[in-house]
Amino acid sequence: MTMNMQPPERVLYFGFRRPLNQEALRAALGRRRPTHVGLISRSNFLGALADEFVDAKHGFRSCTFATNTFRAFPSASFLQRMQPRETVILRMFERIFRGFQTGQDYELRKRLYLEQVAWAYGLLVDRGYQEVIFSEIPHHPFPYILHSVARELGLKARFFAQVQVKDTYVLAESIEEMFEPIRREYDRMRAQGEVEELGVRLQRERERRSGRHKPFYMGLSDLTWRRKLYQWTKKHLRADDRLRLHRTLRNGWAYWRARRPLPAAQERFVYFPLHLQPEATTSPMGGVFVDQYLAIEMLARALPAGWKIVVKENPAQQLAKRDYGFYEQLAKMPQVHLVSRKASTFDLMERCEAVAAITGTAGWEALFKGKPVLVFGRAFYRGAPGTLTVSDVPSLSSGLQEIVEGRFHRCTASELDRFLGAIQRCSIEGVVDTQYLRDSEIAYDESVRRHTEVLADLLHGRAPGWLVKHA
């Protein structure tokens, strides 16, 4: 069902860089065009449909105090309310500083933060926007700032997020609670003894996760030669990575020195596959665990006697984009075995006592194999049966002790089906992230049509609140 609301008359759209998203937005605005439409993107694909266009092609470093002509300016109290998000944003600036001095100094990043907060504040207030819609999770500095400022001003700020479940995405407002509807619906279904008949997409998700399904993004065999060439040049010839050689050599040497063999056959361990960084899966979805060594440190302090932590680097991770000292820190921890990238994640999953993850797919796959999952971040499966949400060392230690004693509740097939049913009820079937078209059985035109329907609902004030979409 849907919640009927007053149709918004002043809407700002952010992103929508891909053809799928652009076609859907144009079609939705063709059905109902608000009084004022703003667009922040790399091109004005809306043409005359946009009353205001901000070019994002060259980033947002031009959003300075000198170029800020808006009358509205944030107060000291507003900036104080923004402080919980400030540290997240300062860390995000690593995305735009990929050179020799990644991260830059605090003063520079703080000034950029204040300038962009003031710029976003002036834009939203002066133009009187009522709603901001993002095509994806705000996970770069300026979109995250814009989302945060909009929410602090009490505006609707929605975004779409593709989930690592086949042909599934959600519409959310809060990054912190983006998957809470799934968890709450599962708890309600379990309390009421309800069972949802699974549609085709969730049945296929269950089937592939029950085996050894290799994620599509781990290979390039299905790409066209043009796309393969683009991926190669992006990896090896990026202009903004021209000074990364020093970091690659330093971190590469530290990585090889930190490597250790797999624990002996009789040794018990927790498997911790590292996340690719920088990515939305850790920033902002990891919360404080954007620093993955913090999660590993917490896990090391909670380990039962004699247990180890097997850490495997993400195969796609560029060493230049790891923090200085990351691998050195792992090398200092006697419980940690940093193993080869080539080690089979499925073999490690079968051998381990539990899987630890920030938000990654490995945690989701582990549930289908009956393994306990320690969840540090805001994963969509957080709160699923067989998971332990990690918040502190004592509760983590207690959970691991339950695993030792055989008292930890492991996920059963019927419970997984119920959780899949909750996902089905609280998500939308389709694709909004074009990368996932590689893994989709939905035709491109159909994906555009479905995305158009959701965008049109928002424009008509029929914001999906309790999404029930059966495959």
Image (tube, grey):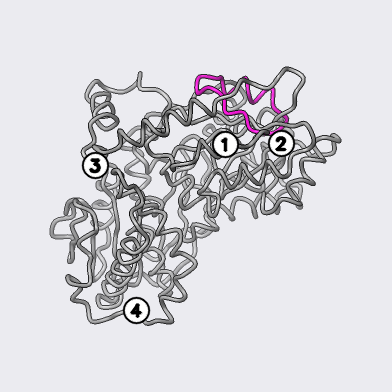
The residue at 37%/41% (across/down) is 433
Can residue 367 be seen at all in this image of the molecule? no
Q: Residues within 10 Å of mark 2 (few under 14, many from 20)?
A: many
The residue at 50%/30% (across/down) is 313
Label 2: state its secondary structure: loop
User: Contact, CB < 8 Å: mark 1 with mark 4?
Assistant: no
List the residue tagged with mark 1: 330
List the residue tagged with mark 4: 74
Mark 3 or mark 4: which is in front? 3
Say above or below: 319 vs 427.
above
Q: Nearer the viewer, residue 363 or 45?
A: 363
Q: Nearer the viewer, residue 393 or 258?
A: 258
Say above or below: 404 vs 291.
above
Can residue 292 be seen at all in this image of the molecule? yes
User: Contact, CB < 8 Å: mark 3 with mark 2?
Assistant: no
Q: The disc labelled 4 sits on which kind of residue?
A: Pro
Residue 353 lies, in percent from the top left, at 73, 30
List the residue tagged with mark 2: 372
N-terminal of the pair, mark 1 or mark 4, is 4
Real-space Cα distance between discs 3 and 4? 32 Å
- Asked whether, in this view, residue 339 is left or right of residue 438, the answer is right
Residue 279 lies, in percent from the top left, at 42, 44
Residues rendered magenta in the picture: 335-354
Mark 4 or mark 2: which is in front? 4
List the residue tagged with mark 3: 240
